[in-house]
């Protein structure tokens, strides 16, 4: 069974649009670059926590190189776009020092607030748990109300990040994530 099959290959938006989910691939570099560039300046900043106009080739390569165990990225693609334009990306990177993984999630501006992020995060968390990761965490800008609302809905605990007054730290034990609707 492929990773995509194991995760379930589709999600449905709150307004009934079916979307396809798949792992990112090494040949998705241009799709990833286009996705980043197409985000509003605010969405790029909320995701990366710094200003970025043009992602470097090395950065894009890093984002599209995964091993499905210690690093994973799932993408949601536009079902009517033959180019498979990205609608959303969720990823994690394992931190073996603490038996956990840091995650990040971005949904294209035009697709936000349609339950894509929560469904994609749950798929990513299920995959992380299947790879032996016991906890997921993520840093979120303190003024990123949309993402803070999303992680609350996922059942994540939120607290101030140590020594970073502008950041919040969201985390969840993956056994709890399996039980959360």
Image (tube, rainbow, N blue to C red):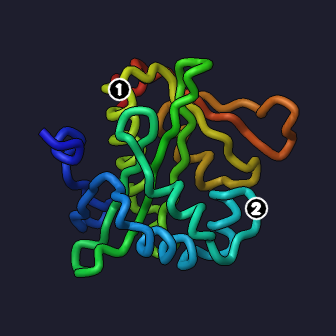
The alpha-carbon separation of the residues under discs 2 and 1 comes to: 30 Å
Kind of element beneath mark 2: loop
Front-most of residues 33 and 152: 33
- Is 45 on the left or on the right of 98, as rendered? right
Front-most of residues 67 and 177: 67
Q: Which mark is residue 161?
A: none
| Residue 57, horizontal then vertical, whole percent | 57, 69
| Residue 14, horizontal then vertical, whole percent | 32, 60
Q: Is residue 150 above or below residue 34?
A: above
Q: Residue at x 87, y 40 (%)?
A: 165
Q: Residue at x 41, y 46 (%)?
A: 66
Specify the quadrant of the image occupied by residue 139: top right
- Is 118 on the left or on the right of 103, as rendered? left
Kind of element beneath mark 1: loop
Image quarter hosting the C terminus:
top left
Image quarter hosting the N terminus:
top left
Label 1 neighbour load within 10 Å: few <14, some 14-19, many 20+: few
Residue occupying the far front of the picture: 58
For label 1, the residue is 131
| Residue 153, horizontal then vertical, whole percent | 49, 40
For label 2, the residue is 50
| Residue 82, horizontal then vertical, whole percent | 23, 81
- Is 75 on the left or on the right of 156, as rendered? left
Q: Are marks 2 and 1 in contact (CB under 8 Å)?
A: no
Specify the quadrant of the image occupied by residue 88: bottom left
Front-most of residues 111 and 102: 102
């Amino acid at each position: 069974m492929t990773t995509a099959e194991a995760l379930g290959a589709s999600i449905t938006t709150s307004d009934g649009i079916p979307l396809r989910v798949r792992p990112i691939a090494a040949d998705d570099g241009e799709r990833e670059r286009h996705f980043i560039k197409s985000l509003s300046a605010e969405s790029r900043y909320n995701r990366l926590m710094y200003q970025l106009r043009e992602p470097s080739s090395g950065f894009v390569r890093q984002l599209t190189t995964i091993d499905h165990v210690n690093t994973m990225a799932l993408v949601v693609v536009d079902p009517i776009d033959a180019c498979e334009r990205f609608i959303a990306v969720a990823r994690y990177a394992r931190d073996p020092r603490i038996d956990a993984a840091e995650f990040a999630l971005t949904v294209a501006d035009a697709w936000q607030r349609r339950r894509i992020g929560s469904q994609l995060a749950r798929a990513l968390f299920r995959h992380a748990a299947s790879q032996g990761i016991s906890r997921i965490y993520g840093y979120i800008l303190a003024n990123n109300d949309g993402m803070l609302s999303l992680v609350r809905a996922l059942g994540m605990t939120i607290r101030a990040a140590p020594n970073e007054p502008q950041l919040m730290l969201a985390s969840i034990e993956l056994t709890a994530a399996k039980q959360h609707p």
